[in-house]
Image (tube, rainbow, N blue to C red):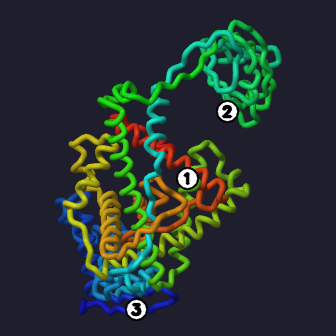
Amino acid sequence: MSDMKVTLDREGKNIVKVGVELEAEKASRAYEITCRELSQQVEIPGFRKGKAPRNIIEKRFGREIIKKEALERLIPELLQQVIVDKNLDIITNPEIQECKFELGEPLTLLAKFEVRPEVTLGDYKGIKVDVPEAKLDDKAIDRALEHLAEQKADLAPIEGREVAMGDHVLLDFDCTVDGESVEGGKGEGLTLEVKEGQFLPNFCEQLVGKKPGEQFNIDVTFPDEYRNKALAGKAALFDVNLKELRQRVVPEINDELAKGYDHESLDALRAAIKERLDEDLETQNRARAQKVVVDAVVEQANVDIPDTMINREHELLMQQMRHEVERYGENWDEYKKGALFAKGEETKKEEAKQRVLHSLVLGAVVRAENLAVSEEEVAPYLAQIAVSNNIPPERYREMAQDEYLMRQITEEVLTGKVVDYLVDNAQLNYVLDEHVHGPECAHGDEQGHGHDHGAHEHGPDCDHGSEGEAKKETKAKAKKESSEEEGDKEEVAASQASGGKKKTKKEK
């Protein structure tokens, strides 16, 4: 703009101060336009709507109000023009530090922006990496079949013996505390699995050795953290009538079991399970390649990340932590006093740094390769969100007009596109992973390709390579969790192969 003078001053790693001086005539014109707009909004006696002169409008609203209205429209226009003319890659909204607007004088403005820090990419195309390859465990199909058999298990009555751990019992009970009946403390026909810690601490342990038909008392103490605060920490007496002893009977793994899952034979069911596990394995190895490649590209890049970007990301992650804590009924202020909070806060700080780092590097690749996404590429993601949330077709168009939602989806699609671009152009050397030989969780945190709808700065923004809390635990726990996850995946594959749908532990 020839009627606007602009100065740029840089400070720190990524701060730009913008000074703007707009000619008095241009500023006055914005004031006049605002007066006309306000006259259209009110009824003023003696004048047709929109025809009241400026002095009447000024008397009605006051000059300061009119100037404020004019600036609310004018400042964004001026700053947007500066951003375009000076090619500023901003990542925050402007902070207005000074603004002087007097009629008949030039308008002066001083604003501060954060701009995207410069990223120097290394060799990101054709990069050579070793990818730990997961292989299908020889016993994976057998374990999946065992899961299916477990789903068909029945409880059969047992006679002639006492209760043992692992049995199931049918019982009635009446609970009293200090000799008084507890509200809701009666139960009839309760089926209970006899295992340690079930129902109430030390309850099932006292069932062991009893026989159906016996009536007896069980003494327990409600946990201090019991959901009913009136009973928390109280000693209780249960009058128990043991009615029946049952044993869980799992069917044999044979053709009959397969037919129960709509497969003509055990071989056909095995083939369906293997097909599903192979698909999961392919997905998992692709996700491993994505993580390794992106980590390698990030490692070769050079970028000086401002603390402000890390702090904003850390604040967002802490808000997510608070949401999770409160979702499980815990008090956030009390949780903050514990050791878990201190550990989690430190972990989230490093995670925030990694998220910002990966976002900046992937964004640099997007710009270097001029990658973009089309409406056709975004449409399937939008449709998937609509289906997942049971949104009726008539609201689909409304979703497509939601600017915030569409920006999130677009960023997610773009992130997937740039990651796929890097992998497709990499030289992958798959090497045997000696620690894992079967499908793990093929989607989500572990794989580094779980897109994050919560966009923070801008550009591709997902958690590639940042380590979650579970990865910080001991090796023994990590090994146990990996084993459970692997078994869970086999169970899901078995259920899907048999025509059902089973949720993973993470989904439950």
The N terminus, quarter of image: bottom left
SS category of the residue bearing label 3? strand
Which residue was labeled with disc 1?
482
What mark, if any, has residue 227 been given in the picture?
A: 2
Q: Nearer the viewer, residue 205 or 367?
A: 205
Mark 3: which amino acid? Answer: Leu
x, y percentage for residue 341? 67, 58
Say which residue appears at 25% left-offset and 56% top-offset: 401
x, y percentage for residue 271? 33, 41
Residue at mark 3 to residue at mark 2: CA–CA distance: 60 Å
Which residue was labeled with disc 3?
8
What mark, if any, has residue 283 been given in the picture?
A: none
Which of marks 2 and 3 precedes in the sequence? 3
Mark 2: which amino acid? Answer: Arg
Which of marks 2 and 1 precedes in the sequence? 2
Disc 3 packing (10 Å; few <14; some 14–19; many ≥20): some
Query: Do the CB atoms of the residues marked 1 and 3 lie less than 8 Å apart?
Result: no
Disc 2 packing (10 Å; few <14; some 14–19; many ≥20): few
5 is higher (above) or lower (below) than 340: below
Q: Nearer the viewer, residue 28 or 358?
A: 358
Q: Nearer the viewer, residue 49 or 352?
A: 352
Residue at mark 1 to residue at mark 3: CA–CA distance: 53 Å
SS category of the residue bearing label 1? helix
